Image (cartoon, helix red, strand yellow):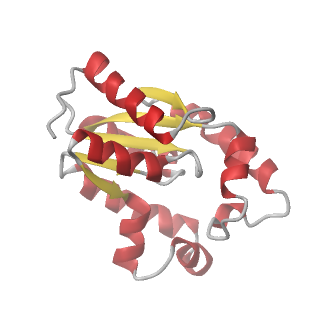
Amino acid sequence: MKKNIVLIGFMGSGKSVVGKLLANNIGFTYFDVDKHIEKESATTIDDIFSKKGEPYFRELETKVIKYASTIGKLVISCGGGAVLKTENMDMLENTGIIVCLRAKPETIFARIKTDTSRPLLKVADPLSKIKELLNLREQHYTRCSFSIDTDKFSVSEIVNSITNTLVEKYGFKINK
């Protein structure tokens, strides 16, 4: 049986807020890949992107995913671009059930339009950039075990839906 639950999805899809509640709900520990990178680097993701570039950040991300994949009983919240590396998805698939949180571009934009810490959206037309990035990542999201649309549901409804799917489809045992 898989030992972790992995949340994948675009920025603003709800991975952090859903992940914290899901971990609590199923008795797992919450692990945020981006927060772990910031803690280990003693700087922000935004600073890493601006000073060392996206390729350097993606290397750090892979190292943290590799580490998290060895632990077990985690709800792992991955950064939106983690799906871009086959190596990341292979590790996550081998050790976890991957849940893709989806949202429409307009919903994502509404959720993050005032957040200035999103380096990939520091462009003239962030909504167009969101659509472009979603289109590029769509093929990678198909590797997920299952998907949940987060547009019209509350966090608790999303968590309940994930929990029910884990129990019904994957025989997951809730050990709180």
Q: Residue furthest top?
A: 168
Question: What's the residue at 58%, 73% (across, down)?
Answer: 46
Task: Look at 31% across and 17% down and name the residue there.
Answer: 169
Percent coordinates x, y for residue 136 in the rendering: 66, 41
Position of residue 102 in the picture relative to residue 23 (left or right): right
Q: Residue at x 29, y 17 (%)?
A: 168
Question: Could you say where residue 1 lies in the image, as x and y percent from the top left?
Answer: 17, 28
Q: Is residue 64 above or below residue 37?
A: above
Furthest residue in direction left, as rendered: 175
Position in image of residue 144 (x %, y %)? 43, 31
Q: What residue occupies the far right of the structure in this picture?
A: 124
Q: Is residue 17 left or right of residue 40?
A: right
**Image quarter (top left, top right, bottom left or bottom right) of the C terminus:** top left
Q: Is residue 126 visible?
A: yes
Expressed as whole percent of the image width and height from the top left, the position of residue 48 reads 53, 76
Question: Which residue is drawn at the image coordinates 44% and 38% (left, top)?
Answer: 156
Give the vertical position of 96 relative to 59 (above or below): above
Residue 91 seen by the camera: no
Residue 33 lies in quadrant:
bottom left
Q: Nearer the viewer, residue 117 or 167?
A: 167
Can you say whether 75 is above or below 47 in the image? above
State whether residue 57 is above or below residue 78: below
- Count of numbered tags: 0
In the image, is 107 to the left or to the right of 165?
A: right
Front in this rendered view, residue 24 or 41 = 24
